[in-house]
Every structure is written in C-alpha cells, then in structure tokens.
Image (cartoon, rainbow, N blue to C red):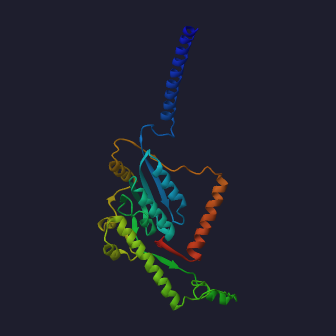
Amino acid sequence: MAKKSRPLLIVLTILLVVAIVLGGILLLVLHFFNPSSTGLFEEKIGVVSITGTISSSEKISSELVKFAKDDSIRAIILRINSPGGGVGASQEIYREVQKITLQKPVVVSMGSVAASGGYYVAAPATKIVSNPGTITGSIGVFIQFVRLEELLNKIGVDLEIVKSGEFKDMGSPDRKLTQRDREILDALIKDLQGQFVTAVASGRNLSVEKVQEIADGRIFSGARAKDLGLVDFMGNFQDAVEITKKIVGIKGDVALVYPKKSTGKLWNLFLKSSVRNIVGVLTEKGGSSVEYRWDGL
C-alpha cells in the first residue's frame, strides 16, 4: 500500500513545486509590466514634500517616520518649497529630520523658496541642494498683532475683559501694547531667535557667532547661501536625486517613492482644503502668532 502511494506523493510534490514556480513568475510579470509599480529589485529613495506655510507637523512627520522605518528605502529626499511657518511645527519637523539622519541620509532639495522655518527644517539634513535663485535664509522670528481699537471706537463697540493677571490679554486687538508688554514679548523673541540660531549652527556645523552675523531676518539667494555655508550644492531636484544616489552608493536607476495619497472622497477633501485655507488666512492675517516665517510672499 505504501509503495502505491509513493508515486502519488511524488506527483503531488512536483505539481506543488510547479505551481509555486509559475505563481512566482506570474507575480514577477505582473509587477514589472504594471505601469504604476517599480522594479522589484530596484533601489528606492523616499520623497517627502513640504509646500506652503508650515502650520502643522503631523503629516510631514508621519511621512518621514514611515520612510525611516522602511528598510527598503535607502534614503529620503525632503523637497521644500515653503516660506516657513509656526515655530512649534517647524521645530517638530526639524527634530524628526535630525533623528532620521542617524539612521539613513536625508537630502534636502530646495525649490523656489525655503526661507525662515523652511530653512529651519532643512538645517539638520545630511546635505542641502539649492537652486542658485532659491530664496532662502530669513533666519529670524516675528510676532504680529492686529489692532482694532480705533475701528471699534468708531463703530461704538467696546470690549470688557476680566482677567486673572496683568498680561493675560496681552496682544488683545482692543488695546495697544504697554511698555511692560513689549519687554515680555522682546524677551520671548530673543529666546526663540536664540533657538533658531542654535539649531542652524548645530545642523550646519557652524559656530553660533557665524550664524548670528547673518541671523537678522535677511534673505539670500541659493548661491549666496552656499558661500555662507548654509547650502552644500547647487542643483535642481534631479541633481538632488543623483547626489542622494552617490551618498548611499546606488548605481543605475532608482525608484522614487512618494507617500500614498488620501483615498477620501473628493468632496470631503475639497471641504477640508477650503477650511484649512480660510483658517490659515485668519490665523496669519487676523490673529496673533509667533512664527519662523518669511513674510515676503
């Protein structure tokens, strides 16, 4: 009985092996001939983009962390086209870039603008690539308040505020800043400015004194920024890709991997985008905020 079952077992084993081989071949064929896929054995570089005002760090940080944990991603290119934004959001992205460079290279590619907070997040990168005409620098911080007391007086509107301390309503639109208010805000600005200077000095391996010399909010061209040690190479995005390949030792073609786009409904995406834009305008122009942002745009 055992002798009769042995040929059947051999046949089943052969069929199983053939099925596995054919299945593997089929997967390879589907993979290579699918236009949306990359080569199975092709080296990969992740690409994360920062576009517009930096108002939140969640999305960018999560994308960076995902690529950092993916062992198939050899390096990350951080494409920046931003005038900067919120202090806290910029610092959170800076910290994430700083940590990731200990695991794998992060190369920054600057677009039209990478100023203030846009430069802040680039500072700790492994290398920074800029176009000669990129607007960058603007190492500084500002806080703005809207004053409406004259308008409120003209239309007969008066605000009454009950507060727990002298400075609780500091920056309120219905009154001017007092001298003591200004002293407190000046101290805050100096503190945040010092943090910016220290972050750039640490990220770029420059002395604090050298960074302080140019940290008066002025902007630079990418070419001038290179002379000052703020940028490593001149080049566009494709140049940044080639530089990244050399850093990690990739020869030949490379697959650029982008974060997956949201699959939410178009209408929901439209509503969210509209609300974000409205809130952004109100926050930037109608309220008060402390920012690492170049206000030239």
Q: As displayed, is residue 280 above or below residue 252?
A: below
Determine which quarter of the picture holds residue 285. Answer: bottom right
Q: As displayed, is residue 20 above or below residue 284?
A: above
Residue 241 appears left or right of 28: left
Closer to the camera in the image, 66 or 160: 66
Q: Residue at x 35, y 44 (%)?
A: 250
Q: Position of residue 107 (x, y in %)?
A: 39, 56
Closer to the camera in the image, 54 or 237: 54
Q: As displayed, is residue 37 above or below residue 194?
A: above
Residue 155 appears left or right of 70: right
Q: Residue at x 50, y 58 (%)?
A: 61
Q: In which quadrant will I find the N terminus?
A: top right
Q: As displayed, is residue 16 above or below residue 85?
A: above
Q: Position of residue 209 (x, y in %)?
A: 31, 75
Image label count: 0
Q: Residue at x 54, y 11 (%)?
A: 7
Closer to the camera in the image, 153 or 159: 159
Q: Residue at x 51, y 17 (%)?
A: 14
Q: Position of residue 177 (x, y in %)?
A: 55, 88
